[in-house]
Amino acid sequence: QVQLVESGGAPVQSGGSLRLSCAASGFTYINYAMGWFRQGPGKEREGVAAIDSDGSTNYAESVKGRFTISQDNAKTTLYLHIHSLKPEETAMYYCAAVNAYYVGGPPLEAYEYNFWGQGTQVTVSS
């Protein structure tokens, strides 16, 4: 049984930084993609960063240069390092995974992912 558990969300001031973590268990596929998504109040869920089993990464334009996705060596924990946070980035941040390989790189579309965590809240104050 696959489980994804996010942590690290917190209240933070505008311009601040956070590191989000996603502990993955039961996810032992050789070829996969994992991603971070967020959903703010009244907004649709959007992909912000993804990584695949080859280590290829993909970022939304709005976060390039400020967000970094990575995994630990054992590939059991997914991270999202966030810098220069903005108030409009207040959202629930979700970790997701899919047991598939994408030739074009890891996708940012939510419908591509079949395993999801419960989310961790990031609140950015101005």
Image (tube, rainbow, N blue to C red):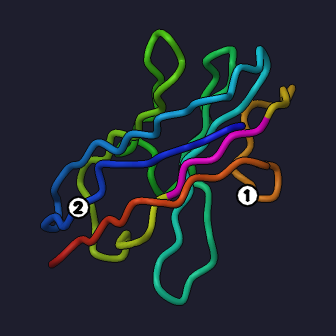
Q: Position of residue 65 (x, y in %)?
A: 38, 41
Viewer-nearest of labels 2 and 1? 2
State which quadrant residue 120 falls in: bottom left
Give the number of the disc on residue 85. none
State the residue position of label 1: 110
The residue positioned farthest toward the top in the image shown: 73
Residue 102 higher or lower than 97, as above or below: above
State the separation of the CA atoms marked 2 and 1: 23 Å
Residue 46 higher or lower than 109, as above or below: below
Residue 101 is inside the magenta segment = no
Disc 2 is placed on an element classified as loop
Residue stretch rendered in magenta on the structure:
94-98
State which quadrant residue 111 falls in: bottom right
**How would you classify the magenta stretch by its main secondary structure?**
strand
Residue at screen point 75% across, 27% down: 32
Residue at screen point 39% across, 43% down: 67
Residue 45 higher or lower than 97, as above or below: below
State the residue position of label 2: 10
Q: Position of residue 102 (x, y in %)?
A: 84, 30
- What amino acid is labelled 2 in the image? Ala
State which quadrant residue 45 falls in: bottom right
Residue at screen point 68% across, 28% down: 27
* Drawn side of residue 105 relative to residue 7, left or right: right
Residue at screen point 53% across, 89% down: 42
Disc 1 is placed on an element classified as helix
Tell whether label 1 touches label 2 (CB within 8 Å): no
Q: Position of residue 101 (x, y in %)?
A: 84, 26
* Drawn side of residue 104 relative to residue 41, left or right: right
Q: Quadrant of the C terminus?
A: bottom left
Q: Quadrant of the N terminus?
A: top right
The residue positioned farthest toward the bottom in the image shown: 42
